[in-house]
Image (tube, helix red, strand yellow):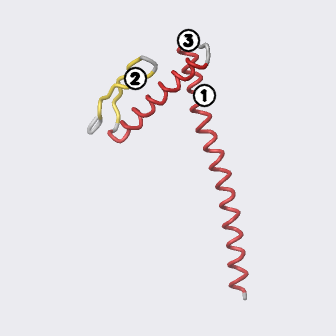
Amino acid sequence: MDGKLKIKISVADRVYPLTVEPAQEEGLRSASKKIDAMIKQFEENYAVRDKQDVLAMCALQFASQVEQKQIDNAIDGEATIARIKRLNSLLDQYLEN
């Protein structure tokens, strides 16, 4: 446990003790704030009373954001590969002359 921090993170009005690397602390605290803000937004906009339902909705929202970023990155990667292939082709043509 050398160099690790013991912190407490609050999510949905519950406190969770964690042992983390110092580099993880800021990200965990930021994530807990985003989760709590999303919970508040869902509770204000929808007639949801059960915290479990709200947490499930938050999990779905965050998971869909991650999935969408992966899809977007894959599409960008394919476009980049196509451009590199085109550049290679142009270089080959230039070098042949």
**First along the sequence among labels 1 and 3:** 3
The image position of residue 95, as x and y in percent, is 68, 84
Front position in the image: 37 or 18: 37
Quarter of the picture containing the C terminus is bottom right
Residue type for callout 1: Leu
Residue type for callout 3: Asp
Residue bearing the label numbered 3? 50
The image position of residue 91, as x and y in percent, is 68, 78
Q: Residue at x 69, y 58 (%)?
A: 79
Front position in the image: 41 or 75: 41
The image position of residue 70, as x and y in percent, is 62, 44
Quarter of the picture containing the N terminus is top left
When asked about the image quadrant of residue 53, the answer is top right
Residue type for callout 2: Ser
Residue bearing the label numbered 1? 60
Is 77 left or right of 52, judged from the image as shown? right
Seen in the picture, residue 48 relative to 32 is either above or below; the reply is above
Residue bearing the label numbered 2? 10
Q: Residue at x 45, y 32 (%)?
A: 31
**First along the sequence among labels 1 and 2:** 2
Mark 1 Cα within 10 Å, few/some/many (few <14, many 20+)? few
Seen in the picture, residue 15 relative to 86 is either above or below; the reply is above
The answer to whether mark 2 and mark 3 are in CB contact below 8 A is no
The secondary structure type at the circle numbered 1 is helix
The secondary structure type at the circle numbered 3 is loop
